[in-house]
Amino acid sequence: MGVAAPEKARISYGEPMARHTSWRVGGPADIYFRPRSRDELVDFLRRLDPATAVHWVGLGSNLLVRDGGIRGVVIATAGCLEHLRHLGDGLVEAEAGVPCTVLARHCARWQVGPASFFAGIPGTVGGALAMNAGAFGGETWQQVVEVEVVNRRGEVTRRSPEDYRVAYREVRGPEGEWFLAARLRFDPARPTSLEAVRTLIQERQAKQPLGMPSCGSVFRNPPGDFAGRLIEAAGLKGARIGGAQVSEKHANFIINAGKASAADIEALIGHVQARVAAVHGISLVPEVHVLGEAADRESRE
């Protein structure tokens, strides 16, 4: 696969994805690219062989990379695309690499409106846009006015929410494009204080196993119910496969309890789905995105 990287680009080959995912598991990426700037990112995409697969990663939450790793290129926005601006009148511009907790804190300082729910999202703005992430009753796309995207050819375009079909934890839009930034509008008549943001963060810490490697919530809440309640009622708190365990603190979290493999975690996800279906007759849908190949792949290109 042909890659002509910029001279000073942060690029590595065979990069272990366990270093870059919140579960601390995952095999190597063929090529791992961390751009220093938006211009460098656009230039990289323009030079990239069109046949090379491209995958985007933020903070590595909500992501399970299989033990066999990822073929193609992983583009990491964490540490890049982190510009955040208050434009006035409740309008904020955030690039894709901005952590959602940082967005929540700045919006509180700027008194732009009710943005504190972003403190409950354990990823970046780009990831939140890609899956319509939400917490504490708020959802990302409720606030979106406009997004900026880039395609495989490095062409940058602005799009409106009308270009996307948005649902609960699901966003569908034009193929072959990735989010660079978003303009978000909040109601300045309903400001959120920094204390409110801190309270929500403390609530997360009290209810969720934040001290252990996890991806956040594993399953979507089914209509009218909560995945965590269903999993707990099925007797699965503490259930374990290898080093992967259903959290004793919050049943919709699977933690790496020590030396888990991605295969352990994926097997436990399947076990939870099967048990909940058997006990409750409900099919749990994962929020987590599974990427890559199993470790038993016989050959690599």
Image: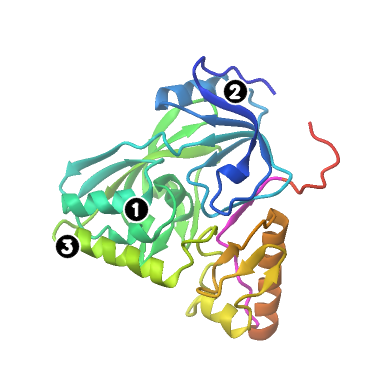
Residue 179 is situated, as x and y percent measured from the top left of the image, at: 44, 40
Residue 79 percent location from the top left of the image: 42, 36
Q: Nearer the viewer, residue 212 or 216?
A: 212
Q: Is residue 205 magenta?
A: no
Mark 2 vs mark 3, CA separation in Å = 45 Å
Front in this rendered view, residue 25 or 113: 25
Q: Position of residue 257 (x, y in %)?
A: 61, 63
The amino acid beneath tag 3 is Arg
Does residue 289 belong to the magenta stretch? yes
- Residue where numbered disc 1 is placed: 101
Name the kind of residue labelled 1 in the image.
Thr
The residue lying at 54 percent from left, 40 percent from top is 56
Q: Is residue 154 above or below residue 238?
A: above
Q: Which residue is mark 3?
A: 190
Figure check: 149 above or below 224: above
Position of 264 compared to 231: left or right? right
Quarter of the image with the N terminus in it: top right
Q: Amino acid at mark 2?
A: Leu
Q: Which residue is mark 2?
A: 48
Furthest residue in direction front, as rendered: 258
Image coordinates for residue 256, horizontal then vertical, percent: 61, 60
Residue in the picture at 34% in, 53% down: 101
- The range drawn in magenta is 281-292
- In this image, 121 relative to 60: left or right? left
